[in-house]
Amino acid sequence: MFVGVLRLRLDIVGARSLKDKRSVVRSLKERAQSRMRVSIAEIGVLDDPRRATLGVAVVSNSAAMCDRVLADVAAMAGSLPHAVLTDRATEIVPFGEGGAGVQGGIEQALGRGEDDLGAASDRFEDAEDDE
């Protein structure tokens, strides 16, 4: 399994209020979620009506598919009529057996037979504290 994450920074053209900004952000979020089945949220500074930072996430069995979906979302953001895409950063992380055998701490705890995610999480945090 692969997890793809994309950060988009937008300048909202002509926005004078947070309502103007939300309209542009909502439009992109709804289009991206319906067409590409990604998770997307506004992150960072929320009270600047002229700037928006969005986080986008996708999960796939293929790193290439993650990259393609995130590139499509970035292209969609770049074509917005009332916003300028000023920066983007992408990271694709392998996770679990389908991701080149890489397992995270929680996943390792669950693999040891822990069937409670909370208990596995507590053990993982305790192990990090010991390091």
Image (cartoon, rainbow, N blue to C red):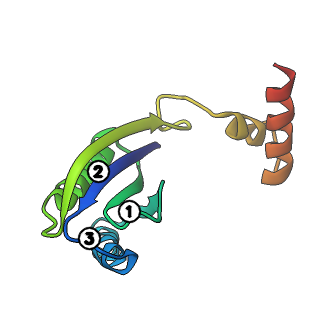
Real-space CA distance between mark 1 and mark 3, rounded to the nearest whole angstrom: 8 Å
Give the position of the C terminus as an image quadrant.
Answer: top right
**Residue identified by numbered label 2:** 70
Kind of residue at badge 2: Leu
Q: Callout 2: few (<14), some (14-19), or many (20+) C-alpha neighbours within 10 Å?
A: many
* Mark sitting earlier along the chain (2/1): 1
- The residue lying toward the viewer, choosing from 92 and 108, is 92
Q: Position of residue 4 (x, y in %)?
A: 40, 45
Question: Is 90 drawn above or below residue 14 in the view shown?
Answer: above
Does the image show residue 52? yes
Q: Is residue 60 left or right of residue 12?
A: right
- The residue lying toward the viewer, choosing from 52 and 54, is 52
Judged from this view, the residue extending furthest toward the front is 16
* Mark sitting earlier along the chain (2/3): 3
Judged from this view, the residue extending furthest toward the top is 131
For the residues bearing labels 1 and 3, Cβ distance under 8 angstroms: no
Does the image show residue 116? no
| Picture quadrant of residue 2 | top left
Query: Which numbered marker is on residue 38?
Result: 1
- The residue lying toward the viewer, choosing from 37 and 82, is 82
Label 1: which secondary element = loop
